[in-house]
Image (cartoon, rainbow, N blue to C red):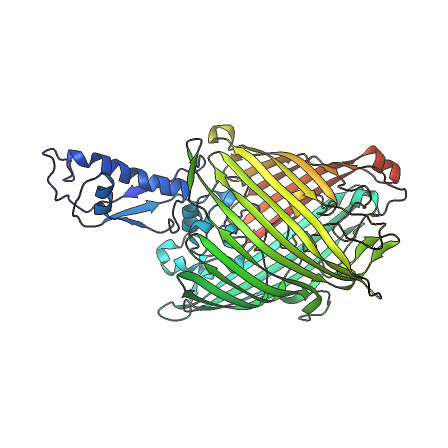
Amino acid sequence: MLPSLKSAATVRYHSIRKDGACTHSVRDGRKATDFPVLAMLLSLPAGIVTMGHGAHAADPVSVNAAGAGALTGQASQSRSENVIVRIGRRPPIQVYPHANPVGQPLRMSGAENRKNGHQYDWGVFNRGNGESAGFGPVGTYGVTPWAEDWSNLRDRKNHNDPFDVLKYIPLTRSGNVWISFSGETRLRNWFETRPQLGTQKPNDSGRFAVRNLYGADLHIGSHLRFFGQLVNADAAGWGGYGYGSTYRKRLDAQQAFVEVRWNMLGAKSGFMFGRQQFLDAPSYMLYARETPNVPLSWDGFRGYMVWKRIRIDGWDFVQTYDSENKMFHDTENYASRLYGFNTTWAPPDFTFMGQKGYSFVDAFYIGYKLNGAAGAIAGPGGSVTGSNTRNNFGMRWHGVAGPIEFSVGGIWQGGVFRPSGTTLARNVSAYAINSSVGYRFSEKTLNTFAGIQTDVYSGGNSSDRTGTIGTYIAPFNPQTNYLDTTTYMTASNLISFAPLVRITPFKSVSIQFKYPLFWRDSVNDPIYKSSGNYKFPGNFRGRFIGMAPQVSIAWQINTHVSWTQYASRFMTSHALNEAGGSSGTYYQSNFVFRF
């Protein structure tokens, strides 16, 4: 199932049968009738290694021989047997898994993620890239250092990296109070021949940005911890544009929260209060704001409970006001609010096409409140500011069915928009449909994943002054490369169809080819970008926007250093060219150090 991983399973047995059912015995004292049981036990760890079957497969597994005997219809009495699973080192390309559970460079089971990654033990929710646990993708080092668990380094035998001395520092003799440090420095540069479909001048823009994110995670026993993270950033280049406070940032607090944990009603439970990042939503709906230097953060609280196969999460946040230019001056932005709840269920595992499978079902409500410019919509004479409330009711089903990987989701977006300076209230009725389905080939075919991604985001009629608004919005930075690596397209009034192929020829290198085609959902609504909508010199009357073939190359140079490059050619349609749009070439490079 995991062709790229040469995992080893070591089995130790320390029991002798007492039933005396047969006169033939094997070398360890077992009898010939025990061979079916022995075969089953020998196959069990291999199944655990490849599929991560069971809620706590990451830990050493203890199998009771009596229980095994019962499976063969024989009553027996024996001492317990210990099955110890030993898993190989994590492939370098999975040190830093990306968002979206479909199409990772290599498949990872929950046992592998827990054993050689640094997730907390969330059982079956550790599977894939780990984002099903509600804390984003977690590998060895990742986008969510606040969700990494380094407590295994209490045993110095587990130290195998020079930076391990910073990942677990005991502050008491018992080691129950300890601190862990994390860090990231990212160097990013862009080159664009015709930025923003030709609407952003000057042409041939080259931008460069650097950011630093350094944090500390203080654990006081197993029930209390404090996490803090600092950010500072700068940007330069030639013909640069868009450099606001999310690109140029003096030293400030990116995150600062306290978390309390306990067991309640059989669930691993927690409550987090303070400034924090939030990723418990589909990445095509909400993510960490990857393109600028300063990630998206929130002020407020969330609470969660995780059982064996179901978890729940609730939250209420206001966005961090990060537009200040002075040190440590970020406060709360009450013009943008995020609240809601999520339930994720892990149905029983299954078999498909002769291979194991598993899935997750998410059901969520996510509410937005946006005021002023943040809540603006497109109107007859341009942008119309006001109070914009959006209520998102959605579901997503995603997982692995043998060689098939899939994610299918739908969102209905209701709400109300109240234009500034009026008593008018306009209802909202919009929707989004998102799917990614693909086939995972074997190691002999370069670990190839081939699939199709389709996305539909409803549009409306920007010439209407009254009536229901039909334009779907996703204001909180969906994952940058989900739709379009150039970021010229956004999740409003858009239909996207994108065949894609990913190959992983080496354990440290993965290459993806993607060919998205874009249409407007409604010709009565403009083309939208990440901030507002495009304004072309002429009137764009067509539906087809264009296509953007793109390639990405990810190279995990070593455990701490990665280099990822993206290249795309956005080819605008004939109708868009006539309206004043322009085709262009886009290149982006990211050189990142993490510990």
Direction front: furthest residue: 467
Left or right: residue 188 versus residue 174 is: right
User: What residue appears at the point 48 percent right and 37 percent down from the top-left corner?
Assistant: 401
Seen in the picture, residue 487 relative to 263 is either above or below; the reply is above
- Quadrant of the drawing holding the N terminus: top left
Q: Residue, x 25% and y 41% (percent of image)?
A: 71
- Residue drawn 68% across and 42% down? 456
Residue 184: x, y in percent? 58, 56
> Looking at the image, which is closer to me, 161 or 98?
98
Residue 385 horizontal/vertical position (percent) = 81, 60
Count how many numbered circles sit on residues in the image: 0
Q: Is residue 478 visible?
A: no
The picture quadrant where one finds residue 348 is top left
Q: Would you say residue 170 is visible in this rendering?
A: yes
Instruction: Tell me if residue 512 comes above or below residue 89 in the rendering.
Output: above
Residue situated furthest right in the rendering? 538
